[in-house]
Image (spheres, grey):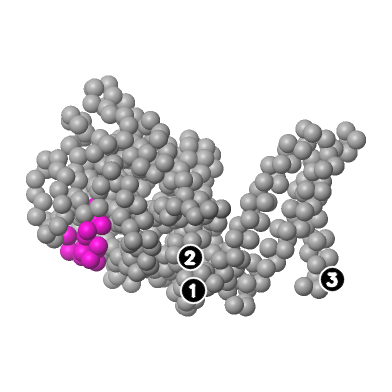
C-alpha cells in the first residue's frame, strides 16, 4: 500500500476516532495455544405460523401416551422424507409446553428466551439473552453468532438488508441483527478470501481502518487520566475484538476460499425459496470454514408467499384457511421444502471428516417455530426437530420423544428443554427462563434439565 493511501486511511480513522471519542477527550482536556477440543456447533432454524405436532409425528405412532422410542424402522411423515437418510441422527421432541410465553402469531423472543413479551405488532421488552445466544457464547468463533433472515418480524413486509425479526437477543434489550440479503452476507462472511471485487476491497479497507483505530485509541489511552482510561478501555476492547477477527479471517483465507459457496444468481434473487436456499448455503459454508459455530436462520414470516412451491397465499392466509388447498396440504408442501433445506445442510456437514467421525456428529440443528404448535399458537406444545450427533452430549439422536400432556403429572416445558441444552454444553444453569405459574400453583411444575436426555 502506498504512503498516500496509508496516510489517507490513517487520517480517516483519526477523524472517526475524534468523533466517537470526543466526550472522553473533552473531559480529559478539561481535567488537564495448545490443541483445542472440537467445536460444538449449533444451527437454529425458526419458522413462522407454528409447527403442527401431527405434521412431524410418524404415521405409525398413534398412541397419545408419553413415549421415548427409537426411530429405527419407523417411517417418517411424507413431508419429512428428505430427512430419512439422517434418521439415525434425527430426533423429534414433542409435548413440551410454553405457556409462560406469548401465544398468537409470534412469541417474539419467548420461543428461545422463555418468557412472555410483546403483542401482535409489538416486540415487547427483551429480558435476557435468548438460549441460542447463550449457546453461541459457549463455542466462540470469529463470527460468534450469525443471524440470517429472509423477512423481518412476524407481520412485517420488511425485506433485505439488516433485519430485526424479534427472535434472538444477545442480552437484555440487545437484539441480534440479522442479515436479510444473501449477497451482503456473502461479502461479510467470505470477503476475506474473495478474489478481487467489492467484497475483497471492502475487507482490506476495513482491516486497515481497524489497525489505525486501535493504534490511535492506545495512544490516547496513555495520555488521559485514570477514570477516563476505564471508559476508553471499553472502546479499545471492542475494536481489538474486531481487529482480532480480521486477523483470524486473514489466516484462514485458504480454508474460507475452499468452503465458500460459488457466488451465483441465487445470492441476488428476490424469490423467497431461493433466498432461503442461499442462506442455508452460506450457513453451511460458514460452519465448515470455521467462521462461526452458531447460526440462527429465520426462514419466513407471515408475509412470506411460497410461489415457487405453487402456493398463492402467504403464510397468514394459509393459517386462516384462505388458500384453495387445505391448510394441511399447504403445510406439508412447505415442510417438505424446509426439510429439503435441512437435509442439504446435514449432507454437507456429514461429508466433512472430523476426528473419528464428521462435522454433523458435532453439530445440533434445531428446527422450531416462533409460535409453538399452530398458526395462533396456544403453546400447550412446542415441537422440535433436531438433526445431528449433538457432540455426544445428548442421547436423543435417532429417537422419538413425547412428554405427558400439559397440566398432567410429569409434564415438562420448553424451559426444561433449554436448561438441558445449556447444561449439556457447559453452562450448568439451575433453570433457564420463567416457570409456568399455573403448573407451579397446581404442583406439577418442574425446574431444571431433562436429565433423561443428558448423556
Image-based side of 417 in relation to 39, left or right? left
In the structure shown, which secondary structural element does the residue marked by tag 2 occupy? helix
Image location of residue 83, percent across then percent down: 24, 63
Q: From the image, state whether disc 2 or disc 3 is nearer to you.
A: 2
Kindly identify the residue that appears in the image at 59 percent across and 60 percent down: 248
Q: What main secondary structure does the magenta stretch of the protein show?
A: helix
Q: Is residue 142 above or below residue 220?
A: below
Q: What's the distance in space between the residues labelled 2 and 3, CA to CA?
A: 35 Å
Q: Quadrant of the C terminus?
A: top left
Q: Quadrant of the N terminus?
A: bottom right
The residue beneath circle 1 is 258
Residue 413: mark in rendering: none
Q: N-terminal of the two: label 1 or label 3?
A: 3
Q: Is residue 201 above or below residue 71?
A: below
The residue beneath circle 3 is 4
Q: Residue furthest front?
A: 34
Q: N-terminal of the two: label 2 or label 3?
A: 3
- The range drawn in magenta is 76-91
Number of disc labels: 3
Residue 289: mark in rendering: 2
Kindly identify the residue that appears in the image at 56 percent across and 53 percent down: 33
Kindly identify the residue that appears in the image at 82 percent across and 46 percent down: 220
Q: Residue furthest right?
A: 32
Q: Label 1: few (<14), some or many (≥20) within 10 Å?
A: few
Q: Label 2: few (<14), some or many (≥20) within 10 Å?
A: many
234 and 53: which one is in front?
234
In the structure shown, which secondary structural element does the residue marked by tag 3 occupy? helix
Q: What's the distance in space between the residues labelled 1 and 3, CA to CA?
A: 34 Å
Q: Are marks 1 and 2 in contact (CB under 8 Å)?
A: yes
The reply to whether residue 347 is in sight is yes
Amino acid at each position: 500500500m502506498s504512503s498516500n493511501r496509508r496516510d489517507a486511511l490513517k487520517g480517516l480513522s483519526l477523524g472517526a476516532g475524534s468523533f466517537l471519542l470526543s466526550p472522553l477527550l473533552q473531559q480529559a482536556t478539561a481535567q488537564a495455544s495448545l490443541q483445542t477440543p472440537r467445536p460444538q456447533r449449533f444451527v437454529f432454524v425458526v419458522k413462522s405460523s407454528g409447527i403442527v405436532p401431527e405434521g412431524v409425528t410418524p404415521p405409525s405412532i398413534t398412541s397419545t401416551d408419553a413415549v421415548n422410542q427409537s426411530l429405527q424402522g419407523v417411517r417418517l411423515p411424507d413431508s419429512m422424507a428428505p430427512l430419512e437418510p439422517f434418521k439415525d441422527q434425527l430426533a423429534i421432541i414433542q409435548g413440551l409446553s410454553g405457556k409462560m410465553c406469548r401465544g398468537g402469531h409470534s412469541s417474539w423472543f419467548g420461543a428461545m428466551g422463555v418468557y412472555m413479551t410483546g403483542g401482535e405488532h409489538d416486540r415487547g421488552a427483551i429480558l435476557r439473552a435468548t438460549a441460542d445466544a447463550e449457546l453461541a457464547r459457549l463455542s466462540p468463533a470469529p463470527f460468534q453468532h450469525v443471524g440470517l433472515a429472509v423477512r423481518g418480524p412476524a407481520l412485517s413486509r420488511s425485506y433485505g438488508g439488516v433485519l430485526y425479526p424479534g427472535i434472538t437477543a444477545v442480552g437484555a434489550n440487545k437484539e441480534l441483527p440479522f442479515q436479510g440479503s444473501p449477497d451482503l452476507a456473502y461479502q461479510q462472511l467470505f470477503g476475506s478470501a474473495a478474489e478481487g471485487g467489492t467484497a475483497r476491497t471492502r475487507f482490506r479497507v476495513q482491516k486497515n481502518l481497524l489497525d489505525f483505530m486501535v493504534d490511535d485509541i492506545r495512544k490516547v489511552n496513555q495520555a488521559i487520566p485514570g477514570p477516563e482510561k476505564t471508559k476508553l478501555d471499553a472502546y479499545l476492547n471492542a475494536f481489538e475484538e474486531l481487529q482480532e477477527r480480521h486477523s483470524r479471517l486473514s489466516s484462514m483465507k485458504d480454508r474460507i476460499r475452499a468452503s465458500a459457496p460459488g457466488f451465483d444468481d441465487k445470492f441476488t434473487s428476490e424469490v423467497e425459496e431461493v433466498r432461503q436456499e442461499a442462506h442455508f448455503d452460506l450457513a453451511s459454508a460458514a460452519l465448515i470454514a470455521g467462521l462461526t459455530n452458531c447460526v440462527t436462520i429465520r426462514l419466513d414470516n407471515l408475509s412470506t408467499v411460497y410461489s415457487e412451491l405453487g402456493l398463492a397465499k402467504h403464510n397468514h392466509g394459509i393459517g386462516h384457511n384462505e388458500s384453495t388447498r387445505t391448510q394441511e396440504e399447504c403445510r406439508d408442501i412447505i415442510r417438505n421444502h424446509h426439510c429439503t433445506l435441512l437435509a442439504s445442510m446435514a449432507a454437507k456437514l456429514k461429508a466433512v471428516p472430523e476426528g473419528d467421525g464428521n462435522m454433523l456428529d458435532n453439530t445440533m440443528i434445531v428446527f422450531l417455530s416462533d409460535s409453538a404448535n399452530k398458526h395462533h399458537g396456544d403453546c400447550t406444545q412446542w415441537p422440535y426437530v433436531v438433526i445431528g450427533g449433538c457432540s455426544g452430549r445428548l442421547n436423543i439422536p435417532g429417537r422419538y420423544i413425547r412428554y405427558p400432556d400439559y397440566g398432567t403429572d410429569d409434564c415438562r416445558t420448553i424451559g426444561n428443554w433449554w436448561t438441558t441444552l445449556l447444561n449439556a454444553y457447559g453452562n450448568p444453569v439451575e433453570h433457564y427462563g420463567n416457570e409456568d405459574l399455573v403448573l407451579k400453583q397446581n404442583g406439577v411444575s418442574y425446574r431444571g434439565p431433562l436429565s433423561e436426555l443428558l448423556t
